[in-house]
Amino acid sequence: DVKVTQSSRYLVKRTGEKVFLECVQDMDHENMFWYRQDPGLGLRLIYFSYDVKMKEKGDIPEGYSVSREKKERFSLILESASTNQTSMYLCASRLQGAGGTEAFFGQGTRLTVV
Amino acid sequence: AQSVAQPEDQVNVAEGNPLTVKCTYSVSGNPYLFWYVQYPNRGLQFLLKYITGDNLVKGSYGFEAEFNKSQTSFHLKKPSALVSDSALYFCAVTSPDRGSTLGRLYFGRGTQLTVWP
């Protein structure tokens, strides 16, 4: 079975903390994505990566950064967590160059910033 | 620009009745279309996709979707709803034009489906 694994299901962090969300996929996919999900707003793309060390800003990159040092791992970093970053975070991966393939999602990380 | 619209935030249907969850899209070129389902506090699960060929595609759990190019729609359907189908459903689109999208999927805002007994 293909798998995208996010390191935590639930996280509680304090305002101002640096937060790392980790995502690992075992499918050798080139593309990886970080989304944020909030009620009524759907999925909003934060960052994506199409290769090791390559990244592109999505629609809401402010306050976030990413790291992709290895193909299988894509990390989302909240440099200084704020309460408005309380949300559900979803990681996904997808094969590149074959437009018809679906994306595979992790189980999500529900982050609460207090 | 590529985008997806799901015009209904909520759909309510009685168990045993047919259900439809609507999706319209905007994309340059030919679309690749997807439906995903999300259960509470879980990630998204793939249901079905349209790439090319027959306009009616069949997917998991008895769901199907009809691609209509003239109406730029890709509605999700099921002939007989189950209470266990209650979940959040997302439509997504991408384009084979790899240079413009780099493999990105564009999602709608989601439709909450409730099936009551």
Image (cartoon, coloured by chain):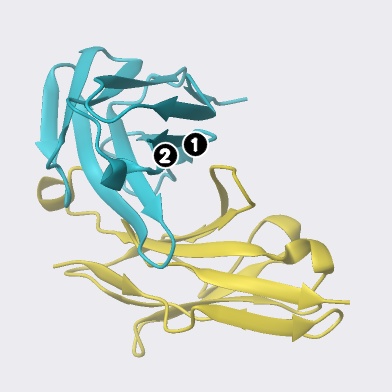
In the rendered image, the quadrant that contains the N terminus of chain B is bottom left
Residue at image location 82% in from the left, 68% down from the top: B83
Quick one: A57 or A109, which is closer to the camera? A109
> What secondary structure is found at the residue carrying circle 1?
loop
Same chain, labels 2 and 1: yes
Q: Is residue A98 found left or right of A47 in the rendered image? A: right
Residue at image location 26% in from the left, 67% down from the top: B30
Q: Earlier in the sequence, mark 2 or mark 1?
A: 2
Quick one: A31 or B11, which is closer to the camera? B11
Quick one: A31 or B108, which is closer to the camera? B108
Q: Which residue is mark 1?
A: A108
Counting from the top left corner in percent of width and height, residue A106 is at 50, 33
Residue at image location 56% in from the left, 26% down from the top: A2
Counting from the top left corner in percent of width and height, residue A20 is at 31, 19
Q: Residues within 10 Å of mark 1 (few under 14, many from 20)?
A: many
Q: Are marks 2 and 1 in contact (CB under 8 Å)?
A: yes
Counting from the top left corner in percent of width and height, residue A83 is at 30, 42
- Colour for chain A in the figure: cyan
Q: Which residue is mark 2?
A: A90
For the view shown, which residue lies furthest in the top direction?
A70
- Colour for chain B in the figure: yellow
Q: Is residue B117 found left or right of B19 in the rendered image? A: right
Residue at image location 74% in from the left, 64% down from the top: B85
Q: Is residue A67 found left or right of B8 in the rendered image? A: left
Amino acid beneath label 1: Gly
Q: Chain of mark 1?
A: A
